[in-house]
Amino acid sequence: MPRPEYWVEAEAKIDIDKGAEMDLASQLENYLDEAGRLKEWPSRRNRGQFQQRALEYLANKFTSDIYYSEKEVNALLNQHHTFGDPALLRRELVERKLLDRVKDGSAYWRCL
Protein backbone atom coordinates (compact mmCIF):
# COMPACT_ATOMS: atom_id res chain seq x y z
CA MET A 1 0.00 0.00 0.00
CA PRO A 2 1.57 3.36 -0.97
CA ARG A 3 2.22 5.83 1.80
CA PRO A 4 0.25 9.05 1.97
CA GLU A 5 2.05 12.05 0.51
CA TYR A 6 2.38 13.78 3.89
CA TRP A 7 4.28 10.73 5.24
CA VAL A 8 6.75 10.90 2.38
CA GLU A 9 7.29 14.62 3.03
CA ALA A 10 7.72 14.01 6.76
CA GLU A 11 10.22 11.18 6.15
CA ALA A 12 12.20 13.40 3.76
CA LYS A 13 12.34 16.13 6.40
CA ILE A 14 13.53 13.62 9.01
CA ASP A 15 16.32 12.48 6.65
CA ILE A 16 17.36 16.11 6.08
CA ASP A 17 17.31 16.79 9.84
CA LYS A 18 19.45 13.69 10.53
CA GLY A 19 21.92 14.71 7.82
CA ALA A 20 22.11 18.25 9.17
CA GLU A 21 22.58 16.95 12.71
CA MET A 22 25.41 14.66 11.61
CA ASP A 23 27.08 17.55 9.78
CA LEU A 24 26.76 19.77 12.86
CA ALA A 25 28.14 16.99 15.06
CA SER A 26 31.21 16.66 12.83
CA GLN A 27 31.76 20.44 12.98
CA LEU A 28 31.44 20.33 16.78
CA GLU A 29 33.61 17.28 17.39
CA ASN A 30 35.89 19.21 19.79
CA TYR A 31 32.87 20.26 21.86
CA LEU A 32 31.05 16.91 22.06
CA ASP A 33 31.82 13.96 24.29
CA GLU A 34 31.74 10.34 23.10
CA ALA A 35 27.97 10.20 23.75
CA GLY A 36 27.34 13.25 21.54
CA ARG A 37 26.68 15.59 24.47
CA LEU A 38 27.90 19.17 24.42
CA LYS A 39 30.69 19.19 27.00
CA GLU A 40 31.47 22.92 27.07
CA TRP A 41 29.99 26.18 25.86
CA PRO A 42 32.10 27.48 22.94
CA SER A 43 33.85 30.81 23.46
CA ARG A 44 32.93 33.91 21.47
CA ARG A 45 36.06 33.57 19.34
CA ASN A 46 35.32 33.14 15.65
CA ARG A 47 32.36 35.51 16.13
CA GLY A 48 30.41 32.88 18.00
CA GLN A 49 30.05 30.59 14.98
CA PHE A 50 30.56 27.48 17.14
CA GLN A 51 28.01 28.78 19.63
CA GLN A 52 25.49 29.05 16.79
CA ARG A 53 26.34 25.55 15.56
CA ALA A 54 26.05 24.16 19.09
CA LEU A 55 22.63 25.75 19.45
CA GLU A 56 21.49 24.40 16.08
CA TYR A 57 22.69 20.96 17.15
CA LEU A 58 20.67 21.21 20.36
CA ALA A 59 17.62 22.64 18.57
CA ASN A 60 17.59 19.51 16.39
CA LYS A 61 16.91 17.49 19.55
CA PHE A 62 13.46 19.12 19.80
CA THR A 63 10.58 17.73 17.79
CA SER A 64 8.69 20.20 15.62
CA ASP A 65 5.01 20.73 16.38
CA ILE A 66 5.38 19.73 20.03
CA TYR A 67 4.99 22.14 22.92
CA TYR A 68 7.36 21.71 25.86
CA SER A 69 7.14 23.02 29.39
CA GLU A 70 10.20 24.79 30.78
CA LYS A 71 10.87 21.71 32.90
CA GLU A 72 10.78 19.50 29.78
CA VAL A 73 13.09 21.87 27.89
CA ASN A 74 15.58 21.78 30.77
CA ALA A 75 15.37 17.98 30.97
CA LEU A 76 16.01 17.61 27.23
CA LEU A 77 18.92 20.04 27.34
CA ASN A 78 20.38 18.24 30.36
CA GLN A 79 20.35 15.00 28.36
CA HIS A 80 22.45 16.64 25.64
CA HIS A 81 25.01 18.70 27.56
CA THR A 82 27.33 18.06 30.51
CA PHE A 83 28.26 21.49 31.89
CA GLY A 84 25.08 21.97 33.91
CA ASP A 85 23.63 25.22 32.58
CA PRO A 86 20.31 24.53 30.84
CA ALA A 87 19.14 28.10 31.58
CA LEU A 88 21.98 29.55 29.47
CA LEU A 89 21.19 27.19 26.61
CA ARG A 90 17.44 27.78 26.84
CA ARG A 91 17.89 31.58 26.78
CA GLU A 92 20.30 31.41 23.86
CA LEU A 93 17.98 29.12 21.89
CA VAL A 94 15.13 31.60 22.36
CA GLU A 95 17.26 34.71 21.68
CA ARG A 96 18.58 33.21 18.45
CA LYS A 97 15.08 32.20 17.33
CA LEU A 98 15.73 28.46 17.36
CA LEU A 99 13.09 27.98 20.06
CA ASP A 100 10.14 30.23 20.75
CA ARG A 101 8.01 30.55 23.84
CA VAL A 102 4.91 32.18 25.21
CA LYS A 103 5.60 35.37 27.13
CA ASP A 104 5.19 33.78 30.57
CA GLY A 105 7.56 30.87 29.70
CA SER A 106 4.90 28.21 30.22
CA ALA A 107 5.36 26.68 26.75
CA TYR A 108 8.27 26.36 24.31
CA TRP A 109 8.43 25.00 20.78
CA ARG A 110 11.01 24.55 18.02
CA CYS A 111 11.06 27.26 15.37
CA LEU A 112 11.28 26.08 11.80
Image: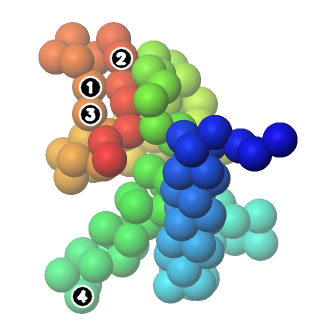
Judge whether residue 38 can be spotted in this image.
no
Label 1 sits on residue:
101
Label 2 sits on residue:
107
The answer to whether marks 1 and 3 mark residues whose Cβ atoms lie closer than 8 Å is: yes
Q: Is residue 46 above or below residue 25?
A: below
The residue positioned 36% from the left and 25% from the top of the image is 108
Q: What separation in Å lies between label 1 and label 3 (alpha carbons)?
A: 4 Å
| Residue 102 lies in quadrant | top left
Which callout, 2 or 1, points at the residue further toward the start of the chain? 1
Which quarter shows the N terminus? Answer: top right
Q: Nearer the viewer, mark 3 or mark 4?
A: 3
Give the left or right position of residue 99, taking residue 32 as reference: left
Residue placed furthest toward the right: 1
Label 4 sits on residue:
46
The answer to whether marks 2 and 1 mark residues whose Cβ atoms lie closer than 8 Å is: yes
Q: What separation in Å lies between label 1 and label 4 (alpha carbons)?
A: 29 Å
Badge 1 element: strand
